[in-house]
Amino acid sequence: MPVSSTDPDVLLGPADIRALAARLGVRPTKQRGQNFVIDANTVRRIVRTAGVRPEDVVVEVGPGLGSLTLALLEAADRVTAVEIDDVLAAALPATVEARLPHRADHFALVHHDALRLTELPGPAPTALVANLPYNVAVPVLLHMLGRFPTIERTLVMVQSEVADRLAAPPGSKVYGVPSVKAAWYAHVKRAGAIGRNVFWPAPNVDSGLVSLIRRDEPLRTTATRDEVFAVVDAAFAQRRKTLRAALAGWAGSAGAAEEALKAAGVSPQARGESLTVEDFAAIAEHGPAA
């Protein structure tokens, strides 16, 4: 079982990160949304906020140079890191071996695109904890939740406005597709803010933590996830329109959309931002494929 380290040299500080990056010839790229965390207190805070337990099998997406990876290995039973970058993927196991040699056999590196990931080695993951690349944060999060149903708890660091969208309740100005799709899987809430100065390079946006606790039971509906998500996508593609108009293409006509909405107990004059995920599921149940 993991034992929390009291050795401050285990985690990577600013000088460690820069030296490691220089040795590898790594320059963080905007294309991959790379901003490396350089503050040990921040990664420990993330692990603590995530509620990582000694028995957890944690999957981390976008580990970069390993700042968060090392903190997770101190707290969890196993950590599997998924990294798309060739150089970073090749270097991370050596960093783990050098800094936490007694935990290296509890670490696995998967060199893969998280958006195309279909399986993970070893025991099934129980938690997802990650500083997600900002340019693909929502698609990666939704893919991981959908592909790995054993993930019970998730804590991700994302761009602050993305965190707001994910955790937004119905009726909020920023409530939209990410909010509803995340709610399909989990109970979602904001779990804190992260300043810009803990990153290298410092991003020009603030960051936020989002906590997702998977539903004890799947949403009760006869519609499939894909059917529900099709309604969600259609409703927000033209969010200024009433649902009768916005769902016309999905239903086949405005009249068919109105029939489905009324059967679901939803006003045809409502707009997507006022509906819960349960409302969208009800509409899907009365859709063209029903």
Image (cartoon, rainbow, N blue to C red):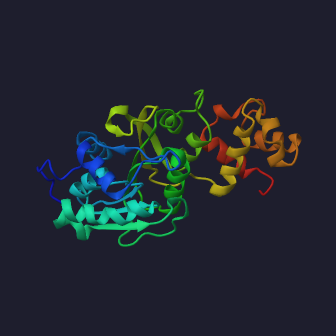
Q: Considering the image in quadrants, where does the N terminus appear? A: bottom left
Residue under the image location 50 percent in, 60 percent down: 114
Q: In the image, is 211 to the left or to the right of 229?
A: left
**Residue in front for this viewpoint, 262 or 240:** 240
Residue under the image location 70 percent in, 50 percent down: 230
Q: In the image, is 167 to the left or to the right of 108?
A: right
Residue 262 is situated, as x and y percent measured from the top left of the image, at: 78, 39
Q: Please state the total of marks drawn on the protein image.
A: 0
Residue under the image location 55 percent in, 64 percent down: 116
Q: Residue furthest left?
A: 6
Residue 274 is situated, as x and y percent measured from the top left of the image, at: 64, 31
Q: Considering the image in quadrants, where does the C terminus appear? A: bottom right
**Residue in front for this viewpoint, 144 or 99:** 99
Q: Locate residue 270: give its quadrant.
A: top right
Tell me if I can see residue 164 in this picture: yes
Q: In the image, is 142 to the left or to the right of 258?
A: left
**Residue in front for this viewpoint, 66 or 126:** 66
Residue 140 is situated, as x and y percent measured from the top left of the image, at: 52, 53
Q: Is residue 142 above or below residue 166?
A: below
Q: Is residue 88 above or below residue 167?
A: below
Residue 224 is situated, as x and y percent measured from the top left of the image, at: 65, 58
